[in-house]
Image (cartoon, rainbow, N blue to C red):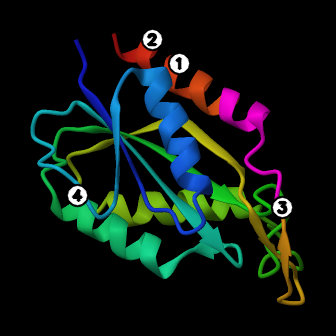
Amino acid sequence: MVKAIVLYNSRTGSTEKVAKKIAEGLGAEYRSNKNIPDLKNYDLVVTGSWVIMGMLSFAGKRYLRKLRRKNIAGKKIALFFTSGSPDDIHPFTENSENPRTVKQIMFESMEKILVKNKDITILQDRFYCKGIVKMTKKGEVKANPDHPTEEDLSKAKAFGEKLKKQLT
């Protein structure tokens, strides 16, 4: 049987809610980035963070670097995040020949930090949803007070269940 854990970095509580539902679907424990256990006995580490202004937060980067230094060699890693506008085209790329979404940039950033440990497998199945705060192109902060929604949380649980089926 595969042993899994869900780890997260949360500022407003949105990412924590999502982590809890993923863990529920997996039948696994979840912990914040402030309480990462020794990972040697885990086969799957599901890790998540939040986005600020379309980029991985400084705290998220620091958390993933800390995670990379833990015993994750040989582990399978699944990624998730919350963002105010994950499907929007990132403002830095909107006028380029290859415009990319916040979602694409976020997953690339997370993967780039973690793959410095060459002995891990990052799964292609990933999850994201809207968080409680949205930054606009003009730098204004707007609330998404209803996020994550019950539907988002249901999808997070289904993501956990899907991972569980794939790995058993």
Please name the amino acid that badge 1 sits on: Lys
Is residue 35 part of the magenta span, yes or no? no
**Image position of 114 with respect to 4: above or below:** below
86 horizontally vs 64: left or right: right
The location of residue 69, given as percent across then percent down, is 17, 64
**Which one is closest to the eye, mark 4 or mark 3?**
3
- For the residue labelled by badge 4, is the local secondary structure a helix, a strand or a loop? loop
Q: Residue under circle 1?
A: 162
Is residue 146 part of the magenta span, yes or no? yes
**Image position of 34 with respect to 61: above or below:** above
Distance from the alpha carbon under mark 3 to that under mark 2: 32 Å
**Which one is closest to the eye, mark 2 or mark 4?**
2
Image quadrant where one finds the N terminus: top left
Q: Earlier in the sequence, mark 1 or mark 3?
A: 3
Q: Residue under circle 2?
A: 165
Query: Do the residues bearing badges 2 and 1 touch, measured as CB atoms within 8 Å?
Result: yes
Q: Residue 113 versus residue 79: which sits nearer the camera? A: 79
Q: Residue at x 67, y 35 (%)?
A: 153
Disc on res. 46: none
